[in-house]
Image (cartoon, rainbow, N blue to C red):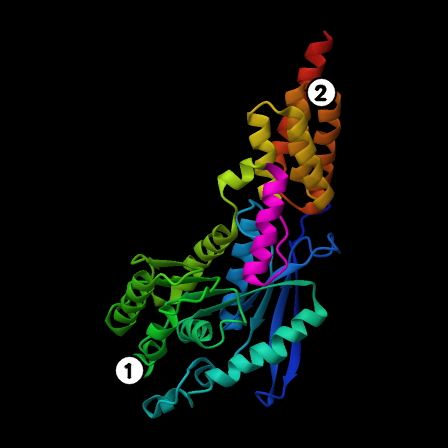
Amino acid sequence: MSMQASAKVRGKANIIAIDSEVLNETRELMVRLPNNYNRYTNKSYPVLYLLDGQGNFAHAAGTLDLLNQSGMAPEMIIVAINNTHRTRDFTPTYDESYNDWGISGGADNFITFLGTELKPYIKSHYRTNGYAILSGHSLGGLLSVYALQSRPELFQAYFSFSPSLWWHDEVIFSDAEKFFSRTDKLNKYLYINMGNEGGQMLSGFERYSELLENNQRKGLTFDTDLDTSEGHNTTALAGMSIAYQKQLASLRPTQDVVEGGLTAIDKYYENLSNEYAFTAKPSYRAYNHAGYSALHNEQYDTAISIFKSNIANYPNKSDAYDSLADGYEAKGALNKALEMRKQALELSYKENVENNAFKTRLKNLEEKIKANKE
């Protein structure tokens, strides 16, 4: 028997190369575009700059896409940077004792490459919204922390998995205490984790975590996780899902804002744009929660209006039509609800998302309408 296959991989990835004058070499990149990138041509996206691209690209992209389907992380462009001279690029100081692993101390130069060449290239070739995340593991985690302390204007968020904070007698701490004790507002997010690693790895993590807790610099949101169920090689794999979700939580409006309706939500994102220096648009989830809050309070017309606004912003999102169907059905406008249920199911195939719930709700509504006629 033969069957026509309709399954397809979500998102699109390209391998490109750029010539760097700063590094005096060509750097290979893997760029993954969100599943909906070509379906929303007027929408811009955050960018995750991923260090150790060869090893981390597949799990970082797959985890993000899985979370996207449940609204647990924002859609992002992923730019994975393949290594050429890892030790050179990720370490802030030269350590002669590490020469067997490669010449060290080129972090400042590499960060300059990120800021003056790579970010402008990505901005000119893709639709970016100005929000950028730097993610690294081990020495890459050290680089991420060092970039926060040395060039905080380049990124809004930093992921650091099992960072090698022990590097060169913990030289990273020479500036860390001064940096985190400053009184000006930082407006950044930092996620750091550590596995069952012990020794200098653990002591460096504990020292840095204590530094963050004791200083609580204004505008800095951070999370630290010690997960002894993971080893050094798997902390990035396990931690990426948590980092994605907590980064989103750091920007999400409170329930009080959501219950204030669209005006309060729009004002929140306007302030967020100013504080974090990027174009922050109200998220689908914020509007959707506001709609269901109104629905819960039996404010049917308000809920329907909010759901319609979400469709206007996300016209190709199947869940938006399913939510509007809930509003119509709660109000008793069953035929309008039926129309939206059918549209949600139809769009789900194009969006390439799980649609069994849409099918079930459509069937239940059809039976409800039939029963009302009898």
The label number, if any, that marks residue 334 in the structure image: 2
Q: Is residue 156 left or right of residue 270?
A: left
Residue drawn at point x = 54 percent, y = 51 percent: 73
Q: Quadrant of residue 230?
A: bottom left
**Label 2 residue SS:** helix
Q: Position of residue 88 (x, y in %)?
A: 46, 86
The answer to which of 217 and 157 lies nearer the viewer is 217
**Label 1 residue SS:** helix
From this viewpoint, is residue 363 visible? Answer: no
The label number, if any, that marks residue 313 in the structure image: none
Specify which label sits upstream in the sequence, 1 or 2.
Answer: 1
The answer to which of 44 and 88 lies nearer the viewer is 44
- The rendered magenta stretch, by its main secondary structure, is classed as helix
Q: Is residue 79 above or below residue 1?
A: below
Q: Quadrant of the N terminus?
A: top right
Q: Quadrant of residue 355?
A: top right
The answer to which of 89 and 291 lies nearer the viewer is 291
Circle 1 residue = 169
Q: Residues within 10 Å of mark 1 (few under 14, many from 20)?
A: few
Residue range in magenta is: 261-283
Q: Residues within 10 Å of mark 2 (few under 14, many from 20)?
A: many
Residue at far front of view: 183
